[in-house]
Structures are given as C-alpha cells and as structure tokens.
Amino acid sequence: MTTTNKPAAVLALAQGRTNGQAATEAGVSARTILRWLEDEDFRQEVDDTRTTLLRVAVGRLAAGATLAVDALVDALATEKGQARVQAARTLLDACLKLRESLELEERIAALEAADRGDL
C-alpha cells in the first residue's frame, strides 16, 4: 500500500475511530495502521489534526453560545413565571461555570509560566 492513504487514516484516528475503522477508511490493513502508529511523526500528525478539529468545534460552540445567551436574556424579559426563573438559573449557572473555568485557566497558565521560569 502507498502512503498516500495516510491523510485518511490521520483524519479517521483524529476523529476517534478505531484502528480497524481507520484502516477501512484509508483502504489499508489494520496492520498498516499499527505500523504507522509506531512513527512519532504520524502520531503527532494525528494529535495536531485532533487539536484542529477541537478548535473548530469550540469555535462553533462559542458562536452557538452567543445565540443561546441571547435567547436566555430574551426569555428573562419576555417569558413569565417558571420559564423566566429557569432562564435566570441557567444564566447564573453558566456564569459560575465560566468563572471557574477562567480561574482554572489562569492558574494553569501561571503554573506553566513558573515551570518555564518566566516569573
């Protein structure tokens, strides 16, 4: 088999497919996938592709989150009773989780900076 099938295998593995599924999608044997996975460059390409896919997904989620927050804020102003309370709870929960996430991100960045000796 030629290495021209590697991009299909990389994408399949980055998307979480099994070695067997990646082999089928790439048109190679499962044994070939195992051999490719022994190569550090191939594994790095799978990791890089997975990171790219995750960044795209996070971007799409962020865009959707803006629409969701708009809908919740609108519900606070236009809905009555239980729907309004639920919208308020949802917004407050999201704010708390976002705050925790940002604080954790700052802590990790500080630890990484300290580890690199940037401080």
Image (tube, rainbow, N blue to C red):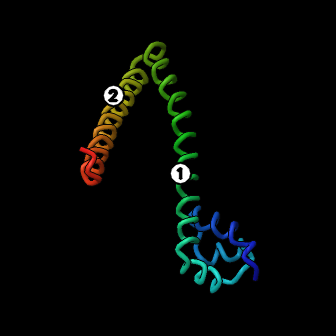
- Foreground pick, 55 / 63: 55
Give the class, few, some or many, for how many residues have Cα within 10 Å of label 1's Cα (few <14, many ≥20): some
Q: Establish if 79 lies above or below 92.
A: above
Residue 35, by quadrant, is: bottom right
Give residue 54's mark.
1
**Residue in the foreground of this view, choosing between 37 and 19:** 37
Vertical arrangement, residue 92 with respect to residue 114, above or below: above
- Of circles 2 and 1, the one toward us is 1
Provide the secondary structure element on which disc 1 rests: helix
* Camera-nearest residue between 34 and 98: 34
**Splitting the image into 4 quarters, where does residue 22 fall?**
bottom right
Q: Judge left or right: residue 32 versus residue 88.
A: right
- Residue at (55% x, 33% y) in the render: 63
Element type at mark 2: helix
Question: Which residue is painted at 55% across and 34% down in the image?
Answer: 64
Q: Position of residue 54 (x, y in %)?
A: 53, 51
Label 2 vs label 1: CA separation? Answer: 26 Å
- Label 1 amino acid? Leu
Residue in the picture at 63% in, 67% down = 10
Tell me where residue 38 appears, x and y as whole percent. 54, 80
Q: Is residue 110 left or right of residue 84?
A: left
Amino acid type at image mark 2: Leu
Nearest to N terminus: mark 2 or mark 1: 1
Which residue is labeled 2 in the image? 92
